[in-house]
Image (cartoon, rainbow, N blue to C red):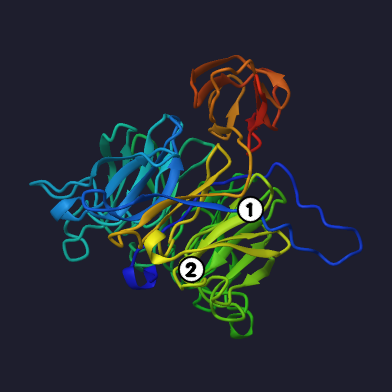
Amino acid sequence: MSKLNLVTKACAVFLLWAAAAVALPAQTAPVSPPVPTVTFTTLFTFGVGDGEGPWGLVQGPDGNLYGTTYDGNGAQSTGTVFKITPSGAFTSLGGFACGPVGCTDGTNPAAGLVLGTDGNFYGTASEGGHENCHADEGCGTIYAITPAGMMTALHLFDRSDGSSPRAPLIQATNGNLYGTTYRGTPNGDGTVFRITLSGMFTTLHSFDGTDGVNPDAGLVQGTDANLYGTTYGGGTNDEGTVFEITPDGKLTTLYNFCSQANCTDGDAPFAGLVQATDGNFYGTTYGGGTNNDGTVFKITPTGMLTTLHSFDGPDGASPEAGLIQGTDGNFYGTTAEGGVRGDGTVFQITSGGMFTTLHSFDSPNGANPEAGLIQGTDGNFYGTTFYGGTENWGTIFSLSVGLGPFVETNPVAGKVGAKVGILGTNLTGATSVTFNGTAAVFKVRSETLILAEVPSGATTGTVQVQLPGGALSSNVPFIVLQ
């Protein structure tokens, strides 16, 4: 079951950089990496009162995972926000409520959350807000929510500035949030927008069909500070595009899908992109490829696309989520369909296209993962399935391939003197923090959070935390801004 039928989507959206590259033997044909030992665990099955149809996850500064459900919340069925520990202890933070003046916070979130530099989470709701839109369903909202569950609406879409946002937000290095809407504006083809943490909203671009239609995924910020994304449809062949847009709104189409015969290069990209350590972007398409079951692709910042893998059904089909690059340098993702039982898969793929199916879902333990994965700072991967489980309302799962713990910075860039949160596990014994080798002043706030200051003389590179048992390095090089 896909969002082509549900008119919903998931996206993922976290940028993870590798600690090492995959080495290939000289002057020999590429060989597949060893198949990892995989441990799959269903952490939680949604039931009455928990929500229904979970989207992607994000790790908070307390080490817990936070997410949303598209449906649920009692009779209103407007969606919920939840948190869950890595061991599976679940807490509902409340639902999207509709009161006498309407559903002003929004309803039915079709995407997960992003952790802001202020410690709050930010997200989009696909409906609610202005009730004069889309047959009284509302045009959707942008909202903020604290880790304790206090929600505030930042912006209510009214169709003229976009409608039906179905993708997660991204916080850029300038501190602003960026995102997309699936519909809205005079052409109804969707938009790219910017919003400050205080709610100042700007429409940056309105799609018109020739440059794309209906962006169904979020954005990623490249190392050049520009933003990159996909549209589900439109473009030269009306099968979707890859685009680049500056933080101020200048858009360039980099690639038009179905440019090859029989769409062997893929079509209909539901998901967003990830920029890898090699500087290229990687993503998936829902359809197209050799078997019309979707693809995994690589594209350079200048628009040269290479198809790395065509799904064939047994190894997965119809990916609706993007990829992440794990700390081993490989990419990890999900397919919404296909696999042994047709309920979707989790897979691994190298930058050279060597593909391994890691897990095939079955309905009792989850079905149809429409969102991507995140890698927790404990080294494990976490994700959700939109269906399956006891009530067929979805599940939350973990998957281990034996990768070790690391630390993650929030934000991923800052000037000298800026305060930086360092997320991890078992951090209470930290004895030093360095930014690319330069010692920083820091304070341990909890076992999952250190606050540090970017030191004078620091340069772009790895953040390292020294612990009694050894050092933990950041998965993403911290960028020192001038």
Give SS at disc 2: loop
Q: Residue under label 2, please give it.
A: 212
Identify which residue is drawn at 13% across, 50% down: 102
Identify which residue is drawn at 68% across, 55% down: 280
Q: Nearer the viewer, residue 207 or 146?
A: 146
**Count of marks overlaid on the render:** 2
Res. 210 visible in picture: no
Q: Position of residue 173 (x, y in %)?
A: 54, 37
Q: Tell me the kind of residue under disc 2.
A: Gly
Instruction: Estimate the spatial distance between the alpha carbons at disc 1 and disc 2, rounded to whole Å.
Output: 41 Å
Q: In this view, does 330 lie above or below 154?
A: below
Q: Tell me the kind of residue under disc 1.
A: Thr
**Label 2 Cα neighbours within 10 Å, binned few <14 / some 14-19 / many ≥20:** many
Residue furthest to the left = 100
Q: Residue under label 1, please give it.
A: 37
Q: Position of residue 255 (x, y in %)?
A: 60, 68
